[in-house]
Image (cartoon, helix red, strand yellow):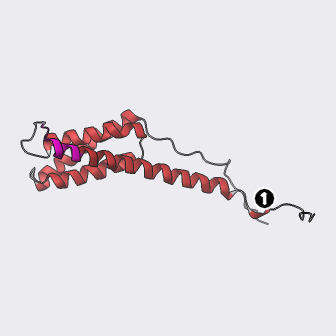
């Protein structure tokens, strides 16, 4: 007779977010590579394409980051966007409304990624915890008395 035995040792913990310095290093390297690739393929006259790509990178980094890493991730992506994805390349500038909008988009993308990851992990943990509670465990063993 074959008996199926669970190899699980209990509920798995929720994954820990990556350390903030590691996320920032990935943001630095990823933004550098992405902007270099976009500049080579599309040129420096398409900042909206670069903003979309960097926002996607920021959201992906947010999936494995803490909330405290979001501002630094957004600023690192913005530095490469502002410094190398718009002419004149290599010069940081501040154009009030434009750069505020760009920073807001990058910060929102990072926060959306982080919130999405936290909700997904919380939902998975809830399912793992409630999976062990079946109908037999929640129903009383005896009939309630009618007074």
Please name whichever residue, 95 or 38, is drawn nearer the observer in this view of the structure.
95
Horizontal arrangement in the rendering, residue 143 relative to residue 68 (left or right) = right
Residue on which disc 1 sits: 137
Residue 69 visible, this orientation: yes
Q: Residue at x 11, y 46 (%)?
A: 86
**How many labels sit on residues?**
1
Q: What x and y, as percent, mark residue 129?
A: 65, 53
Q: Which residues are magenta?
A: 93-102
Position of the C terminus, as image quadrant, is bottom right
Horizontal arrangement in the rendering, residue 58 relative to residue 122 (left or right) = left
Q: Is residue 92 above or below residue 43?
A: above
Q: Residue furthest front?
A: 147
Q: Is residue 127 above or below residue 110?
A: below
- Tell me the chief SS of the magenta region: helix
Q: Badge 1: how crowded within 10 Å, few (<14), some, or many (20+)?
A: few
Q: What x and y, as percent, mark residue 13?
A: 59, 45
Q: Element under label 1?
A: helix
Q: Residue at x 37, y 37 (%)?
A: 69
Q: Residue furthest top?
A: 21
Residue 81 visible, this orientation: no
């Amino acid at each position: 007779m074959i008996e199926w035995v669970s190899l699980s040792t209990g509920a798995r913990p929720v994954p820990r977010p990556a350390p903030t310095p590691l996320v920032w290093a990935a943001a630095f390297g990823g933004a550098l590579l992405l902007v270099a690739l976009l500049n080579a393929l599309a040129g420096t006259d398409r900042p909206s394409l670069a903003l979309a790509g960097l926002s996607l990178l920021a959201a992906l980094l947010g999936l494995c980051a803490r909330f405290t890493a979001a501002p630094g991730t957004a600023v690192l992506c913005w530095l490469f966007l502002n410094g190398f994805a718009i002419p004149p390349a290599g010069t940081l500038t501040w154009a009030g409304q434009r750069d505020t909008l760009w920073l807001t988009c990058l910060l929102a993308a990072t926060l959306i990624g982080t919130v999405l990851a936290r909700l997904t992990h919380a939902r998975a943990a809830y399912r793992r915890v409630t999976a062990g509670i079946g109908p037999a465990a929640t129903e009383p063993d005896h009939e309630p008395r009618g007074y």
